[in-house]
Image (cartoon, grey):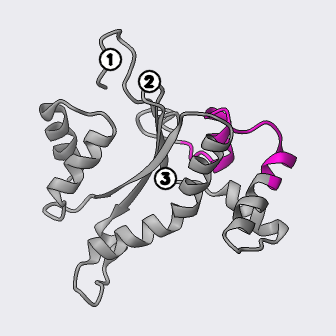
Amino acid sequence: MESHDDGTRKCYFPSAVEEATHDKWTVRQILVQLGLFSEIKSLRVDVTEFHARQGIVLTDVEITSFYSRRPDGVAFNDKNKHCVFLEFTRQMDSVTSSPEGDWAESKELEKNARYGMHIYFINHLSALHGRPWNCTQANFTVGARGSLKQTQFQGRLRLLRVTNSKARDKIRALTV
């Protein structure tokens, strides 16, 4: 893992418990990590008010579902105050193609839509509470040799502060 000059890691991945396993974090757990969660009652109010501003009325079940959603992974960069939702897809998960014929782009749009409101909510809450955090999403399609969109993949690794090209090449080689 790449480090800053002071030796601290550029990004850390708390959902990666060990090399072979991981624990998916809920949006609520992510909010705790970012210092944006104090109690469940206020979180429910924040979620309700946020959606009401969008013209959306949620039931109690939908409110709970919203903050219980679990992205595949999450990365934090404390120095730059950047939180990244990580989503992973295998080519086999995307056998059908879009009318335009690009299954990868279709899957990309689907993944972005799944967490778009969550990311918007976290950024809104961060600004509301005067916290400097910025939340984004990085999607990775992995596991099928030759199916990787290399420019996209490299860009997402740079987003995670993997700046060393040899490290990015090694990750790519281990991925496909």
- Quarter of the image with the N terminus is top left
Mark 1 or mark 3: which comes first in sequence? 1
**Is 141 within the magenta?**
no
| Residue indicated by mark 2 | 79
Q: Residue 90 location, x and y as percent? A: 33, 64
What crowding class fits label 1: few (fewer than 14 Cα within 10 Å), some (14-19), or many (20 or more)? few
Q: Give the side of residue 97 with respect to residue 146, left or right.
A: right
Cα gap from disc 1 to disc 3, whole angstroms: 26 Å
Looking at numbered disc 1 in the image, what kind of residue is underneath it? His
**Is 44 within the magenta?**
yes
Mark 1 or mark 2: which comes first in sequence? 1
Q: Residue furthest bottom?
A: 99
> What's the residue at 16%, 60% (across, down)?
145
Query: Residue 66 appears in which quarter of the rendering?
Result: bottom right
Q: Which mark is residue 174?
A: none
| Residue indicated by mark 3 | 72
Q: Residue 18 location, x and y as percent? A: 46, 32
